[in-house]
Structure formats: structure tokens, C-alpha cells
Image (spheres, rainbow, N blue to C red):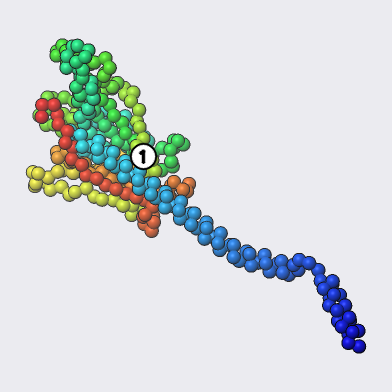
Amino acid sequence: MTTIKFLLVAWLKRSSKATKTGGFTLIELLIAIVMAVLIITPLMGVAISILDTNRKEQAQVTSEQEVQAGLDYIARDLQQAIYIYDADGVAAIRDQIPTDDDQEPVLVFWKRKVVPDSLPYGRDANECCNDAYVYSLVVYYLIKDNNQTWSNTARIARFEVSDGVIDPFSDPDDPEYLDDYPKDEGFASFNLNEFGDIALNMNNWQNGGNFENPTMVLIDYVDDTTIAQNSDVPQEACPANDPNDENDGNWQQVPDYDAAEVENKFKTYSFYSCISSSRNIAKVFIRGNALARIQQNNYDFQANRTSSYPKARVEVRGTGKLRGQ
């Protein structure tokens, strides 16, 4: 009986194993899929959130760097200024500089520009050369247009027109330019002898004809949110003027938002200046727009995301001198 019982048990065990099928049941597969979805979905959400945060942070860093680099360039440029136009001055010469409906002058000034190794100090070809200094008129614009080459926001561009280098051996009564250093088309120097006041002389400057020099973009992605769209855009008022103080700087904002010729689309406080022509000082303000780098809409300024609109300011006194000073 013991032997028969043992064989029967062994047969039943083998029969039981033989009836089992390999792999997972349908219920087991469904449970595995549900668990995978529950685990992977949050991980995907976290990954997407991290990537989106990185994109925003990179856009913000890039905008901060470009705003600061642009401001540093302008500051170096302004250091050589001999005269900076205030709002009254810009209005006076507005028709003499390149202007159209898509660009607004923000900084206009005269500077001394060095032309290295250009001035011969002898008639011998080997007796060359010293550096020369010439006058240049520089204009920085805020541009807002539909040019597809650039962003949907605004940008800052620079225009410059310069005098040439006078041949030191030409007739003083009829000076000629050196062949390699002519003046730019449209350039004309200012006349300081027409009126007694330097501001009147500068405000009466007239160009020498049509300009050929291009306007070069300095930085893009400048915020274009207007004060009509959001009155909370960051802004810093120019210093108050004291009519009883002879040493008062007589500060003026450029562009003058109250002037009829300044269109609403340029009233952004994203690129503007405070100018004291009498002190030859300029305060310059720039505000970028990092959101516009990563999305095509909903990038206008909002107070709850100010970090996406990096801003910077600088104050510069022009140290350039007129000839003879």
C-alpha cells in the first residue's frame, strides 16, 4: 500500500504541473500596465517640468547678459561724448537724422572718434602715421516693426556718421580729406560760431545730404509692452528740476512721451534715457524680455513674473573735448 500510495501522489503532482500554462494572465498584464502608467506619468511630468524650467532659466540668463552687454557698449560710447542732446535737442534735429515710423531716437550725441594710424606727420611715405580724432554723430534707436529677421518684440540699433581725416598738408583755406579717410556720406560738422550758446548751435545742426551708413542692431528681445497695455511696467523718473538752482541739470526724458511725434508703441520704458545736456550726462535704462525667446505669445510684462524682464541702468558723463579744449 505504501508503494502504491507513493506512485499515486507522484503522478498527481506531475499531472498538476503539466496542466499549468506559461507566461502571465490577462489580469496580471493589465495590473502591470496600470502600475507602469502610474509610475512613469509622474516621472514624465517631472522631466518635462525640469526641461521647461531650464529653458526659462537659460532664456533669462541670455537676456540678462545681452541687456548688460548692450548697456556696457552704450556706456563706453557715451564716455567719448562731447555733447548729448536732450528732448528739446532731439526734436530740433529730428528731421536731420534717419527717422521713420518704425524707429524712435533715444540717444543722440556727438563724440570724438579715434582713427588709428591715419595722420601722416611727414610727406615721406615712411613718416606715417599718428592717430587722428574726428567728430561723429551717434544715434541709438528703439525699433519696433514687422521684420521677420528679428523677434516679435523691440530691438535697439545704432547709427553713426563720421567726419574724415583732413590732409595736414592741404590748403588750410580749402582743406582736403586724405584719400583713404573720406567723410561719410551725409556728414556735416556743427558750427559753434553761429550762436553764443552751445545748445543753440547744436540744435541748429543740419546734415550734409543723404546718408548711406546702415543702422546696425545692437540687441534684440527688448520688451515692447507699452504703458497703455500695462501701466505697471518698471520705470524710473528723471531727476526733478529746480528752476531756482543755477546748477540744476535741467533733466529731460528721451523720448518725450508727451511729444506728438512719439508714437504709442515706443512708450514702453524699456529703452529710454534721462539727459542733462548742460552737464553732458546721460542715464540710460534697458529692459529685456526673456519670455519672448521661448514663446510666441503671452510674453507681455506682468508684475508677477518680473524676473523674466531683466533690466539694467547706467549713468555716464561724457568726457570728450572739443578741439581746442
| Spot occupied by residue 111 in the image (x, y as percentages of width and height) | 21, 31
Circle 1 residue: 219
Residue 4 seen in render: yes
- In the image, residue 319 sits, relative to residue 31, either above or below, namely above
59, 175: nearer the viewer: 59
For the point 91% across and 84% down, the residue is 4
138, 8: nearer the viewer: 8
- In the image, 321: left or right of 103? left
Residue 90 seen in render: no
Quarter holding the C terminus is top left
| Quarter of the image where one finds residue 88 | top left
| Spot occupied by residue 168 in the image (x, y as percentages of width and height) | 17, 16
138, 11: nearer the viewer: 11
For the point 26% across and 14% down, the residue is 179
Outermost residue toward the front in this view: 3
Outermost residue toward the bottom in this view: 1
- In the image, 118: left or right of 291? left
For the point 22% across and 28% down, the residue is 113
- In the image, residue 272 sits, relative to residue 47, either above or below, namely above
- In the image, 22: left or right of 205? right
| Spot occupied by residue 234 in the image (x, y as percentages of width and height) | 31, 52
| Quarter of the image where one finds residue 22 | bottom right
Crowdedness near tag 1: few (<14), some (14–19) or many (≥20) residues, C-alpha within 10 Å = some
| Spot occupied by residue 8 in the image (x, y as percentages of width and height) | 89, 81
Quarter holding the N terminus is bottom right
For the point 14% across and 43% down, the residue is 249
- Considering the numbered disc 1 on the image, is that residue within a helix, a strand or a loop? strand
265, 223: nearer the viewer: 223
Q: How many marks?
A: 1
- In the image, residue 322 sits, relative to residue 121, either above or below, namely below
Q: Amino acid at mark 1?
A: Ile
